[in-house]
Image (cartoon, grey):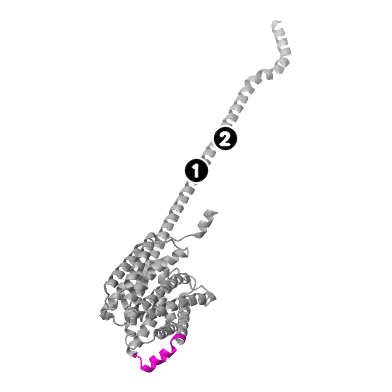
Amino acid sequence: MKNVVCLALLSLNTPVLKAFAPIRQTPSIVRPYAINNAFTTTTKTTKTTLITTSAIQTESQLEEASLEKQDAAITTTLEASSSTTTDTTSTEEDDENAEFQKGFAIIAFITLLNASLAPVWHVVFEGNGPPPLFLNAIVSVTALVGLLLGGSVLDDSVESMSALAGAEEEKWAWKSWRGGIELGFWKGLGTTCHIFGMSLTTANHGAFLLQLTTLIVPVLQGLRGAEEIPARIQLAVGLALAGIYAFTQDPTKATDIIADPANIQTGDALVLAAAFFYSIYDIQTFYWGREVPRTELVTVKVGFQAMLSVLLCAIGCRSEVLDYIQSGPDLAVLVPTVLWSGLIVNALATFLQVGGMQAVGPTRAQTIFASQPLWASIMNYVFLGSLMGVQGFVGGGAFLGALFLAATAEAPKVIDKTEDAAQES
């Protein structure tokens, strides 16, 4: 019976047990699965986070590496640029120094040519010499002919300066005529006074007094507001004035009898006037050389100078010229003088001066021209036996002292009026 009851109970409880079986089984089966899923999800998230973090770190490292490469490239570029700039600056400085040395040599050569005029003109005026205005006219015409025939050859043969007007400038423009006429006017007046003065004064007086250009040019530059006049230049002006007074009191010596003692002071005054005109000419040559092609500027200048000198000769000494020609000039002296003064000193030296002046500037060029009395005195002594008296030595010493002060003064400072006006406003 007990077995029958138990079997009956078991048979009755089976559906119940079956019904409750999932409930009992669920905790033991579902919970481990959920935990496993959660763990797996967390693991995946962690791995994703780690991968993402690693990717960010890697990307950051790549960006840093890229920036470092860019910085290195920029540094290399800057260093190369700096090196190039340094090399360019060094090259430019070398070129400027070479050009200055070349300009210095040109102005020194012109100084020797100008110094040679002292004995040459003095010889031609000895005895039956030509009227000064006539000599000036034929010398100027000779220079013009020489430039018309050989100007292009000179332009091709003589190396140009960087500051000169280039070939791209308009050919034979109005400014070419304007610049050439202005230069011809000042040089024509200077040459006329120079030749006329040299016919009346002594060779040494003419050579020394003409070098007032060394003082006049800086003074004119200061008065124009282009440069400040250094204190040494101001002292040189006062010393030169004292020297000029003593120098012009020197009487004619036996070895220098070509000049008439009564006319020496007139001749000195004319040479001083020539120095003033030459000073303006030098300053304007520096300006126009940058504006007008060299050959055009020199050709127009010499052409106008020739026309002016011929006009002055026709008005001032026509009868004297006729008398001179009829008396029979000494062609053995006149012809070499005209060729040397016209072709070499007036044509060649003028052509070279336009370029040389650009390299050294008008004020510094005068410090080179200051040596002209030395060379002229040597030439006068060699060819003429010309000497000076006591007053001449005193005045000449003072004058050379003034020239030394001018030559050794600090470079004049250029005044920038634009900056001054801006500061005032």
The percent coordinates of residue 78 (x first, y second) are: 45, 52
The percent coordinates of residue 123 (x first, y second) are: 31, 84
Distance, label 1 to label 2, CA atoms, is 24 Å
The percent coordinates of residue 251 (x first, y second) are: 29, 76
* Quadrant occupied by the C terminus: bottom right
The image quadrant that residue 279 belongs to is bottom left
Q: Nearer the viewer, residue 369 or 191?
A: 191
Residue shown at the point (52%, 38%) measured from the top left: 57
Residue shown at the point (43%, 82%) measured from the top left: 147
Find the magenta span and give its range: 315-330
Instruction: Indicate the secondary structure of the residue bearing disc 1.
Output: helix
Q: Amino acid at mark 1?
A: Glu
Label 1 CA crowd tier, 10 Å (few <14, some 14–19, many 20+): few
Q: Nearer the viewer, residue 412 or 8?
A: 412
Vertical side of 39 occupied by 66: above or below: below
The image quadrant that residue 322 belongs to is bottom left
Visible residue check, residue 354: no
Q: Is residue 291 magenta?
A: no
The residue beneath circle 2 is 48
